[in-house]
Amino acid sequence: MKNPWLAAGLNIISGLGYIYLDPKRVFGWLILISTILLSLGLLDHSSSSQIYASSQPTIWDTASMFGGLILWVAFVIDGYAEAVRANRRQQ
């Protein structure tokens, strides 16, 4: 039996509570990875702190874009899985 308070507390770091809950483990890892990538993209990096002096995206911009994409995919997968579970409960 999983402790709901522990799951909630672990989710202070996005995704850890879902990793703790076995059926949501993949969702949790996707959320955690996307949070890390989005955070890296938001950091102020001194080498790329020139305000859009070049039109080339930096590695941090790319990390942030992948973080957003992974987050979107995580919610798509979770929505699909929840619908499948709901259908199984109704049968």
Image: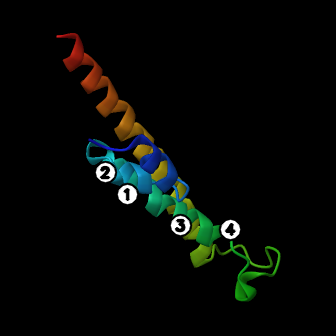
- Of the numbered discs 3 and 4, the one sitting upstream in the chain is 3
Query: Is label 1 in contact with label 2 (beta carbons under 8 Å)?
Result: yes
Q: Amino acid at mark 3?
A: Leu
Q: Which residue is mark 3?
A: 37
- Name the image quarter holding the C terminus: top left
User: Which of labels 3 and 2 is toward the front?
Assistant: 2
Q: Which residue is mark 4?
A: 42
User: Which of labels 3 and 1 is toward the front?
Assistant: 1
Quadrant in which residue 52 is drawn: bottom right
- Of the numbered discs 3 and 1, the one sitting upstream in the chain is 1
- Name the image quarter holding the N terminus: top left
* Front-lying residue, 64 or 4: 4
Residue appearing at x 40%, y 38% in the figure: 76
Residue appearing at x 53%, y 67% in the figure: 37
Q: Amino acid at mark 2?
A: Arg
Q: Relative to 22, is 52 on the left or the right?
A: right
Q: CA distance from mark 3 to mark 1?
A: 12 Å
Q: CA distance from mark 3 to mark 2?
A: 18 Å
Badge 3 marks a residue whose secondary structure is: helix
Q: Amino acid at mark 4?
A: Leu
Query: Is label 3 in contact with label 1 (beta carbons under 8 Å)?
Result: no
Q: Which residue is mark 2?
A: 25
- Of the numbered discs 4 and 1, the one sitting upstream in the chain is 1
